[in-house]
């Protein structure tokens, strides 16, 4: 028996004929070391084969190259991007199930890897839509996005260290001056109490190193964005820089995956969740089911757009209108709403390639108002 493949002891599978592959459906439960395979008969639903493979490209390629054109279901996870690409290269139908929606698996009282593989196969046999399948981005997009994620990881680490320094100083009755993160280690040196200099000196040194690495990755991202000319279209919007533009392009990857730009808001998890039942339809918070890094970047852009002194635009006017309504958390809700509209706008600009007009909506409203007020004016009848 191949060392990369282990048949489960309770069942000894028979060899499946290569001419009958369309009659079978596979559930693949992926683990760091081993992955479990369950092969179902498409018509009867009976388990035809169960086996265990090493989670390596060679082992998976060796096993699945023996089959042709079968439907394979697996869950999203660390290994799912490269495995789905590998199986796609072998001309299989690959369904990558959204793990968030598979309560049948992760809330099962009898949960184990073998049953997870079988449940995936049965859901794929019954109706693929039950898996809420997603499509992983390509290898190049994943590689480029890795640069952006690495920078974000360093930024998050720097923020934690800065908060640690500020908190430590406050406990001694002192306060550090307000300053930007990239010059924090220089600005606060003189304000740190003598009793904490030895303890915080190494932390400030790490922050200085992180600043250098973040700066290097920022320059790398700016150079990388030049390989994606469409980022220039998105950067027309005031407040959207190369990092946000590149992250938006790489996260969505295919601008035609959405029939309507408006659905981008839901894709990014920036629309309210729903729990409607009968006459009950409570207002809930946003779902946060999309990419958290892109959602955070869009939120930062929205904050910049709504900042006092920033240029006027339709987006800013929309946000200020929501803030003016008042209520609990009005500013927070306005920022989220502007971020959602910004995501929709960026996708629309990407699809059409049009020049960005910050006052497009106002012009449309004024034009419609003019037609209502003076419908017979010859100037309003011009095309």
Image: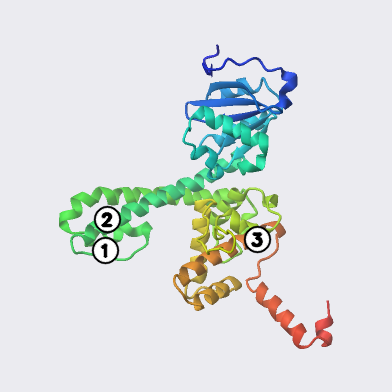
Quickly name the residue at label 1: 176
Residue 86 position in % (x across, y down): 62, 30
In the picture shown, does residue 379 fall above or below 149?
below
Q: Residue at x 27, y 55 (%)?
A: 165
The tag earlier along the polypeptide, 3 or 1, is: 1
Q: Is residue 26 visible?
A: yes
In the picture shown, does residue 331 fall above or below 380?
above
Mark 1, Cα crowd under 10 Å, few <14 / some 14-19 / many 20+, is some
Marks 2,1: beta carbons within 8 A:
yes
For the C terminus, the image quarter is bottom right
Place residue 73 in its image quadrant. top right
In the picture shown, does residue 273 fall above or below 98?
below
Quickly name the residue at label 2: 165
Mark 2, Cα crowd under 10 Å, few <14 / some 14-19 / many 20+, is many
In terms of depth relative to the viewer, which is nearer, 277 or 223? 277
Place residue 353 in its image quadrant. bottom right
For the N terminus, the image quarter is top right
Q: Secondary structure at mark 3?
A: helix
Q: Residue at x 67, y 59 (%)?
A: 261
Instruction: State how far apart marks 3 and 1 are (Cα).
Output: 44 Å
Quickly name the residue at label 3: 262
């Amino acid at each position: 028996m191949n060392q990369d493949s282990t048949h489960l002891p309770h069942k000894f599978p028979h060899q499946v004929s290569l001419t009958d592959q369309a009659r079978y459906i596979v559930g693949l439960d992926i683990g760091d070391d081993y992955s479990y395979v369950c092969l179902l008969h498409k018509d009867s639903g009976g388990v035809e084969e169960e086996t265990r493979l090493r989670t390596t490209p060679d082992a998976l390629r060796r096993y699945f190259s023996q089959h042709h054109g079968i439907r394979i279901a697996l869950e999203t996870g660390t290994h799912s991007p490269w495995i789905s690409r590998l199986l796609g290269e072998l001309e299989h139908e690959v369904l990558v199930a959204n793990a968030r929606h598979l309560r049948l698996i992760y809330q099962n009282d009898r949960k184990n890897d073998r049953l997870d593989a079988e449940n995936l196969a049965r859901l794929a046999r019954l109706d693929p839509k039950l898996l809420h399948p997603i499509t992983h981005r390509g290898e190049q997009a994943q590689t480029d996005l890795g640069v952006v994620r690495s920078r974000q990881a360093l930024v998050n680490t720097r923020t934690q260290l800065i908060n640690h320094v500020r908190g430590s100083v406050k406990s001694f009755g002192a306060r550090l001056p307000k300053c930007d993160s990239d010059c924090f280690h220089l600005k606060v040196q003189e304000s740190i109490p003598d009793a904490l200099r030895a303890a915080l000196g190494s932390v400030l040194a790490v922050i200085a190193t992180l600043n250098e690495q973040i700066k290097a990755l920022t320059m790398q991202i700016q150079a990388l964005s030049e390989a994606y000319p469409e980022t220039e279209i998105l950067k027309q919007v005031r407040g959207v820089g190369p990092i946000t533009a590149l992250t938006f392009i790489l996260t969505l990857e295919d601008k035609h995956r959405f029939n309507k730009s408006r659905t981008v808001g839901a894709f990014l998890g920036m629309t309210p969740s729903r729990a409607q039942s009968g006459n009950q339809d409570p207002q809930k918070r946003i779902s946060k089911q999309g990419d958290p890094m892109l959602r955070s970047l869009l939120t930062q852009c929205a904050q910049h757009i709504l900042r006092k002194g920033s240029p006027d635009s339709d987006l800013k006017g929309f946000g200020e209108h929501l803030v003016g309504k008042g209520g609990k958390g009005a500013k927070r809700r306005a920022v989220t709403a502007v971020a959602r509209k910004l995501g929709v706008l960026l996708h629309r600009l990407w699809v059409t390639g049009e020049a960005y007009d910050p006052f497009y909506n106002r012009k449309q409203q004024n034009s419609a108002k003019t037609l209502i007020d003076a419908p017979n004016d010859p100037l309003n009848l011009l095309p």
